[in-house]
Amino acid sequence: MIVLAVSLALATPPIAAQTADNGSKDDAIIVIGEKLKRWSAKLKKKDGQLVCKIKKSTGDAAIDRIGCDAMTTCFPSVYSEENIVAFEALPKSERKAKQRLLNKQLTSCVFDSRATMIDELAELRAAE
């Protein structure tokens, strides 16, 4: 069975190294991305709900929430009940390859979700 406690310390995918001179949205994106590089958390199932337990905080609750929201959104779509049943039905020899594929899908989903949320937060902060 796939263990539900997932620990992710995902490196933030490369962010375009655009640095504006005026404390712009681009600067905020870079700062948020850098902080998320050091962030990590664990997902657990508690009372039927996914719970994100932060292991290493960024020190910024809004940025921490980006990491947790991305994980709690992506995990159920990648590790759906259907995928778990299919995974468990595989011969042991094929499980590692399938696990790598599911982890790759999870990572991709988390990066995409994070990018959207980083952009939204950066826009809010640049407007302040």
Image (cartoon, rainbow, N blue to C red):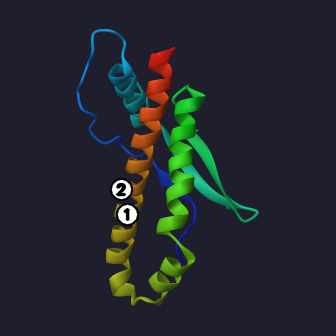
Disc 2 packing (10 Å; few <14; some 14–19; many ≥20)? some
The location of residue 110, given as percent across then percent down, is 43, 51
Local secondary structure at mark 2: helix
Residue 21 relative to residue 57: left or right: left
Q: Amino acid at mark 1?
A: Gln
The location of residue 122, given as percent across then percent down, is 44, 26
Q: Quadrant of residue 34?
A: top left
The location of residue 107, given as percent across then percent down, is 38, 55
Depth order, front residue of 120/63: 120
Q: Is residue 67 above or below residue 99?
A: above
Q: Residue at x 39, y 90 (%)?
A: 91
Q: Residue at x 44, y 18 (%)?
A: 126
Outermost residue, right side = 47
The location of residue 43, given as percent across then percent down, is 58, 55
- In the picture of the structure, the residue carrying the numbered disc 2 is 108
Local secondary structure at mark 1: helix
- In the picture of the structure, the residue carrying the numbered disc 1 is 105
Q: Quadrant of the N terminus?
A: bottom right
Q: Is residue 8 above or below residue 78?
A: above
Depth order, front residue of 22/61: 22
Q: Residue at x 34, y 84 (%)?
A: 94
Residue 64 relative to residue 21: left or right: right
Residue 56 at least partly seen: no
Q: Amino acid at mark 2?
A: Ser
Residue 29 at least partly seen: yes
Q: Is residue 87 above or below residue 126?
A: below
Residue 73 relative to residue 94: left or right: right
Marks 2 and 1 sit apart, C-alpha to C-alpha, by 5 Å
Q: Residue at x 49, y 42 (%)?
A: 40
Depth order, front residue of 72/95: 72
Could you tell me if the residues under marks 2 and 1 are in contact, i.e. CB atoms within 8 Å? yes
